[in-house]
């Protein structure tokens, strides 16, 4: 075996060892001494490669290594969350800053911006470089030792690339849909073990990253690259002067990946049309019947993950694969369009599931953001298909389009005013005979108050709900309007502050200086003053009811420690304070 082949195997073995070590040290374990051990092993392997390839390190790099060891040791020597956070991320920063100095040795020429971007830049380049390293390692194998024809090997490579994505998508889709899970279990007759999938991914990701890191280190001396036994070089550097060299996937490989993913998505979509979009009262095909709402209200988080991973996969295939002829370009466009159409259906499935969930439990801010994100990512897919796939615009044009799209969405969110929209949608539930979550409604911002107080004018709202809303407005008034004194010296200390006094303090703060003026708070105060009598009436009823229940408890637990009359008297005071 030649020295160059030994070097190649050394890089692969070191990267694989780190991948296995990362799984052993970190999977389902709290960060502690494991972080120090991991960094120590990475440093030892790096120093072995540096010595092996005759690369010199300067004093600054030695100083960075010592600081790295010190900070990573601080993760298990100290328990302060503040120190742990900065020791952890500081160690990662220093590790990749150390690696980046092999490409930019003169640190004294670094600008402020370069200190910030050099570590993440090296990480991204190494991640890409691992792909080229694997590709050129494959090319270094003599032709007589390769299996099958070139097309067969390309298809096989596409299957290998698609396999981890297929496993992840199968797990996510089966978690999202019980019927799909049942059919998948019948076909393959095995359960998806999250532990095995997660641990395998950890090993593969860390191995892949450090393949790029170590190959970059090995090829950093005078810009050299490791040469294989044949004519093709075995890469350790990802830098290239030719843009086409960055595209490491051929047309057959990328098409194979897309076709396999699309077949999986198609099977999932067929089930969606039969069950989810069909709106059956009961869902069959699994061991026990479940209602449509039970079936539909789960899985939107998994489908969100599928959408994000699918976009990243398609983006990566478009960026890393080359199409030589017009026919290949046309086929790739068709396959990309098919995937995006399928993803549109899956996004609609996630939307439907979230809508069913909201119908059952009401709208919250996080659920509102899910709807917004689904619309946003659907728009991103369409822009990517039009700008990047069909028009073949530069990446900068696509990114600028996404930037503009994000600005439009953020403008729309400001116009809609989420808290007002959420309050309106939740109050509508009362007219539909559904339960209102008054506790959550009162936890919305001042923006929602003008909508919330409308409840007091509605005839079909129960007195119990109005009492709860009045109570929450009383307790949260100081917090919402930043009345610091009242908030600190309120009725919790036995000195009840009337609702009228709270409103007066809020108005005083509002008019204190023009610099602090806020239109939303002004509208909220106006709405509270207009509904003052109703709020005080139901607030008084609430505290009277609490006092009655409290006195009843006193009678039932007389003589028991902790059973006293002070709390009951406090409720009675609160009931009378605004009269």
Image (tube, rainbow, N blue to C red):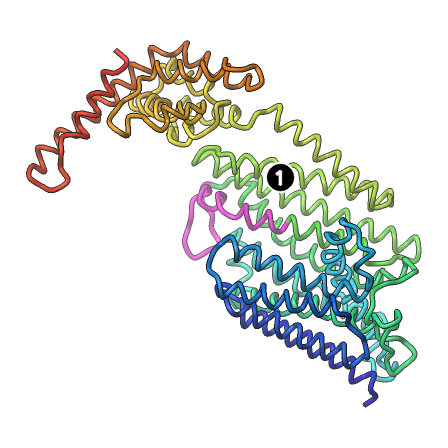
Q: Residue at x 77, y 52 (%)?
A: 114
Which secondary structure lies at badge 1?
helix
Residue 395 in view in this figure: yes
Q: Residue at x 90, y 81 (%)?
A: 230
Position of 87 with respect to 151 (left or right) is left
Q: Quadrant of residue 546?
A: top left
* 420 shown above or below 198: above
Residue 189 in view in this figure: no
Q: Residue at x 73, y 67 (%)?
A: 61
Query: In front here: 449 or 151?
Result: 449
* The N terminus sits in image quarter: bottom right
Which residues make up the magenta segment?
Answer: 281-306
Query: In front here: 519 or 155?
Result: 519
Q: Residue at x 49, y 41 (%)?
A: 280
Query: In front here: 157 or 320?
Result: 320
Residue 302: say if magenta. Answer: yes
Residue 539: give x, y in percent of width and height: 29, 19
Residue 441: give x, y in percent of width and height: 42, 28
Residue 143: give x, y in percent of width and height: 88, 81
Circle 1 residue: 373
């Amino acid at each position: 075996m030649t020295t160059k082949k030994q070097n190649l195997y050394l890089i692969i073995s070191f990267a694989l060892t780190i991948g296995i070590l990362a799984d052993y040290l970190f999977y389902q374990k709290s960060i502690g001494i494991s972080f120090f051990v991991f960094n120590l092993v990475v440093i030892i392997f790096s120093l072995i490669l540096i010595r092996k390839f005759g690369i010199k390190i300067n004093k600054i790099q030695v100083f960075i290594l010592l600081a790295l060891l010190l900070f990573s040791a601080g993760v298990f020597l100290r328990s302060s969350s503040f120190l742990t956070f900065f020791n952890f991320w500081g160690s990662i920063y220093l590790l990749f800053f150390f690696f980046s100095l092999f490409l930019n040795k003169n640190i004294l020429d670094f600008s402020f911006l370069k200190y910030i971007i050099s570590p993440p830049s090296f990480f991204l380049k190494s991640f890409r470089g691992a792909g080229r390293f694997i590709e050129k390692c494959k090319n270094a194998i003599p032709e007589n030792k390769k299996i099958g024809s070139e097309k067969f090997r390309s298809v096989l490579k596409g299957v290998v690339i698609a396999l981890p994505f297929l496993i992840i998508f199968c797990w996510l889709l089966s978690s999202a849909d019980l019927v799909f899970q049942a059919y998948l279990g019948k076909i393959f007759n095995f359960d998806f073990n999250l532990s095995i999938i997660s641990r395998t991914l950890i090993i593969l990701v860390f191995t892949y990253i450090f393949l790029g890191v170590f190959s970059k280190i090995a090829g950093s001396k005078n810009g050299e690259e490791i040469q294989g036994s044949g004519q093709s070089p075995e890469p350790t550097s990802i830098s290239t002067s030719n843009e086409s060299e960055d595209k490491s996937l051929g047309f057959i490989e990328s098409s194979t990946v897309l076709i396999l993913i699309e077949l999986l998505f198609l099977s999932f979509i067929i089930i969606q049309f039969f069950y989810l979009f069909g709106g059956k009262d009961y869902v069959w095909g699994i061991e026990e019947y479940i209602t449509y709402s039970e079936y539909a209200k789960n899985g939107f988080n998994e489908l969100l993950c599928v959408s994000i991973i699918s976009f990243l996969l398609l983006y990566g295939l478009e960026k890393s694969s080359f199409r030589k002829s017009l026919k290949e370009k046309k086929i790739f466009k068709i396959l990309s369009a098919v995937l995006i159409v399928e993803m549109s259906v899956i996004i609609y499935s996630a939307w439907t599931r979230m809508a069913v969930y909201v119908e059952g439990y009401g709208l919250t801010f996080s659920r509102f953001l899910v709807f917004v994100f689904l619309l946003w990512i659907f728009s991103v897919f369409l822009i990517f298909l039009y700008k990047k796939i069909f028009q073949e615009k530069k990446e900068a044009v696509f990114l600028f389009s996404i930037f503009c799209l994000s600005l439009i969405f953020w403008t729309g969110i400001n116009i809609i005013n989420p808290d007002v929209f959420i309050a309106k949608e939740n109050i509508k539930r009362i007219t539909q005979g559904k339960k209102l979550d008054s506790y959550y409604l009162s936890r919305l911002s001042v923006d929602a108050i003008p909508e919330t107080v409308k409840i007091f004018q509605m005839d079909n709202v129960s007195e119990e709900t109005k009492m709860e809303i009045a109570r929450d407005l009383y307790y949260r008034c100081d917090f919402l309007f930043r009345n610091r004194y009242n908030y600190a010296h309120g009725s919790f200390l036995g000195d009840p502050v009337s609702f009228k006094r709270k409103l007066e303090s809020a108005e005083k703060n509002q008019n204190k200086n023009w610099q602090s003026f806020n239109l939303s708070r002004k509208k909220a105060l106006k709405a509270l003053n207009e509904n003052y009598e109703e709020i005080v009436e139901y607030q008084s009823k609430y505290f009277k009811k609490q006092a009655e229940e409290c006195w009843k408890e006193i009678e039932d637990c007389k003589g028991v420690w902790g059973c006293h009359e002070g709390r009951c008297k406090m409720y009675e005071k609160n009931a009378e304070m605004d009269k």
